[in-house]
Amino acid sequence: MSHEAPVLLFTHCLRAYLTYKTLYPAEVCGIINESDTVKRLRIAVHPDFIFKAGQWVDFFIPGVETVGGFSMCSNPGLLQREGVIELAVKYTKHPPAHWVHTVCTVGSSVAMRVGGEFFFDPSPSDPSVDLLLVAGGVGINPLYSVLLHTTDLLRLNQASGGRDCNIGSAHLCYSAKNTQELLFKGSIIEACREFPDKLSCDFHVTQQSTDVDPHLQPFIKRGRIAAEELRAHVDPQRTMCYLCGPPPMIEAISKTLMDLGLPKDRILFEKWW
């Protein structure tokens, strides 16, 4: 190791530590209606702002006393390429979410601080893992970030002939009430088609009352995520599972995974309330 390497490593670690303690100014630069109840914000951030796929931000709004907490749905690659992050926020009466849906406009100023130990950030020396991503409702946000990051890493590996991170597979199980509430479904399917030997997904709908669009039908399963489906994607030595959704779902899926032999330390979760 060169003399410069420890200095560079220390500098990187210090920058990461300061990022997770620092409040950064930011500005909303785009608003997209992701669904009838979810708005996706594009937010231009400070050049020193960094995060890991799966993390969340404390979201500070001028004039709103309550601090929001939103998982990023974008990946670090978008930040590197465009200097923006994205948040998908569902409408509720909670003041920060209510502000996003009723007051926020392009040009609105906010401030953000990164947090969370729920992330996927493999290094080239890490052993390969197979990801099992299980999302309920807007719990898709951090897992979509992880999926996008995995897709970026697969592209890098493809370009380098496999000399970068040793990436395994990733399977997404995503449950929502109906197909309208399945966020990001189009780009999730595109990623799976780009890397069919590495990425796969199943969309579960629990209260679908209309016909499913033909292009979605191959990916749709009716009813809740079942043990049989999870079993096909659990290898106690290789699988790392990331869960995000309502607490009852997290508790039920975690128990099922442990019953299938997946060690507790290979089940990571983020609960939303």
Image: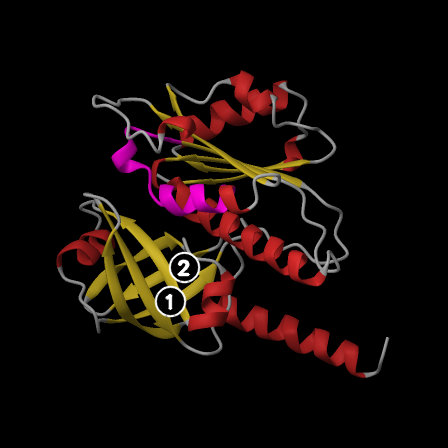
Task: State the CA–CA distance, disc 2 to disc 1.
Answer: 6 Å
Q: Quadrant of the N terminus?
A: bottom right
At x 13%, y 56%, the residue is 102
Q: Mark 2 touching mark 1, by CB under 8 A?
A: yes
Q: Percent from the top left, x then y, of residue 61?
A: 25, 66
Q: Can you tell which mark lies on residue 57? A: 2
Q: Tag 1, which secondary structure?
A: strand
Residue 259 colored magenta? Answer: no
Left or right, 185 with reference to 225: left
In which image quadrant can residue 60 be found? bottom left
Please indicate whether residue 226 sits to the left or right of residue 165 in the image: left
Q: Position of residue 17 (x, y in %)?
A: 58, 69
Instruction: Report the quarter where the C terminus lies.
Output: top left
Sequence order check, earlier mark of 2 and 1: 2
Is residue 240 placed above or below 109 in the rendered structure? above
What's the residue at 64%, 74% (across, down)?
A: 12
For label 1, count other residues whose C-alpha is less than 10 Å away and answer few (under 14), some (14-19) or many (20+): many
Q: What's the magenta region?
A: 175-192
Task: Note whether residue 22 is visible.
Answer: no
Where is mark 1, residue-wise? 112
